[in-house]
Image (cartoon, rainbow, N blue to C red):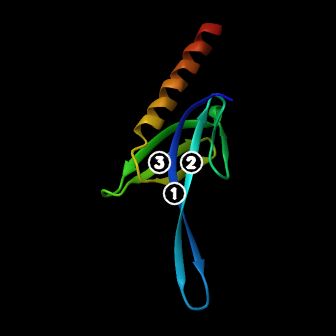
Amino acid sequence: MNLIAEQSYIKIVREVSSIDQIDIEQKRKMYLYKEKIVTQHREFSIEDIMDISYRFIGEDGGLLYLHTKYGVYSYIVKSSPAAFVEAFKEYRETIRQDEGNFK
């Protein structure tokens, strides 16, 4: 597999006991390969991803959205995912150009 780009994201895991509640922030990575995007628990085929976008919320980060044929998946990011999004869009454009050359 050829890695094109990677993006850090976080997952908030809430642990509840009989006396308290604790939020644990887990650091994770998302990887863009030629044939798929991989997160810790999911894989998305490149053909199933229609778009990727993001929105900043305050100064502490924002949300990265994967728009797929099966719905929108959101991921909390603390750093700008602009390079990851741009890498996806550039790669998708090369796929479209290559498909056009084969028709």
Give percent across and percent down for residue 33: 62, 32
Dot in front, 3 or 1: 1
Q: Secondary structure at mark 2?
A: strand
Tell me the kind of residue under disc 3: Leu
Which residue is nearer to you in this view: 102 or 23?
A: 23
Left or right position of 41 against 8: right
Ranked by sequence position, the earlier of labels 3 and 1 is: 1
Mark 3 vs mark 2: which is more N-terminal?
Answer: 2
Where does residue 81 sit, x and y in percent of width and height?
43, 42
Residue 20 image position (x, y, % from top left): 54, 87
Residue 74 located left or right of residue 44: left
Task: Report the disc number at residue 44.
Answer: none
Q: Quadrant of the C terminus?
A: top right
Q: Which one is closest to the eye, mark 3 or mark 2?
A: 2
Q: Give the residue at mark 3.
A: 64
Find the distance from the CA under tag 1 to the CA under tag 2.
8 Å
Disc 3 versus disc 1: distance between alpha carbons? 11 Å
**Amino acid, disc 2:** Lys
Give above or below for 78 relative to 22.
Answer: above
Q: What amino acid is labelled 1 in the image?
A: Ile
Badge 1 is on which residue? 10
In the rendered image, the residue lying farthest to the front is: 27
- Residue on which disc 2 sits: 29
